[in-house]
Amino acid sequence: MMFATKRSLSDATNAVAKQLENVYSSLAATKKHLSSRIDRVDCSLDEFAEITASTKEEVSSLRGNTEGIALDVQKVHHAVYTLETKLNRIEFKQDDTNLGVARLLRTAITLENQASVGHIQANPSSSSRPALPSPQRVGYFSH
C-alpha cells in the first residue's frame, strides 16, 4: 500500500496543472489556427460568390448577344435566299432571251440567204421578176 504525502499530492497536482496548461495552450493554438483558416475560407466564399454573380451577368449578356447574332444570321440567310431566287429568275430570263436572239439571228440569216438566192436567180434569167419575192421586213428592228 502506498501513502500519499502532502508533497507528492502537490507534485501530482502541479504535474496535472502543467499538462492541463499544455492542453489549454494547444487548444488555444488550434482554435487560432482554425479561426484563421475559417476566415480565409469565408473570404474565398465571398470571392466565389462575387465571381459567380459576375459570371451569371456575363452569361446573361452573352445569351442576349447570341440571340441578336442568331437573328442577324437569319436575316442574312433570308437575304441570301432572296438573292439566289432573283439570280435564278434572271438566269432563266437570260436563257429565254438568248434563245429568242438565236431564233432572230436564224430568221435574219434565212431571210438574208433567201434574198441572196433571189438576186442570183433573178440576174441570169430573162424575166424581170425575181424567182422569189423579196421578204418584207417586219418591225423588229428600228433603223
Image (spheres, rainbow, N blue to C red):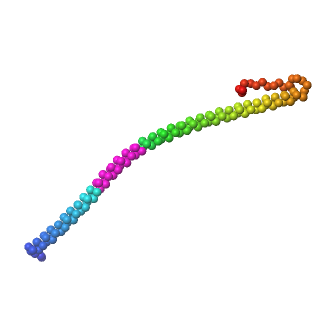
Q: Is residue 21 left or right of residue 90?
A: left
Query: Residue at the front extreme?
Result: 143
Residue at the spot x=56%, y=35% of the render? 82
Residue 39's place in the image compared with 105, above or below, is: below
Q: Is residue 135 left or right of residue 50?
A: right
Residue 4's place in the image compared with 31, above or below, is: below
Residue 25 appears at what percent x and percent y? 19, 65
Image quadrant in which the N terminus is located: bottom left
Residue at the spot x=16%, y=69% of the render? 18
Q: Is residue 140 visible?
A: no
Residue 131 appears at what percent x and percent y? 86, 26
Residue at the spot x=35%, y=50% of the render? 51
Query: Residue at the bottom extreme?
Result: 1
By secondary structure, the bulk of the magenta-drawn segment is best described as: helix
Specify start and end residues of the magenta stretch as a single range. Answer: 41-62
Residue at the spot x=15%, y=68% of the render? 17
Residue 52 painted magenta: yes
Residue 39 appears at what percent x and percent y? 26, 56
Q: Quadrant of residue 132?
A: top right
Number of labels in the image equals 0
Q: Is residue 84 left or right of residue 109?
A: left
Residue 116 appears at what percent x and percent y? 82, 30
Image quadrant in which the C terminus is located: top right
Query: Residue at the right extreme?
Result: 126
Q: Is residue 104 left or right of residue 126?
A: left
Residue 138's place in the image compared with 18, above or below, is: above
Q: Quadrant of residue 86?
A: top right
Nearest the camera: 137 or 92? 137
Nearest the camera: 33 or 100? 100
Nearest the camera: 20 or 122? 122
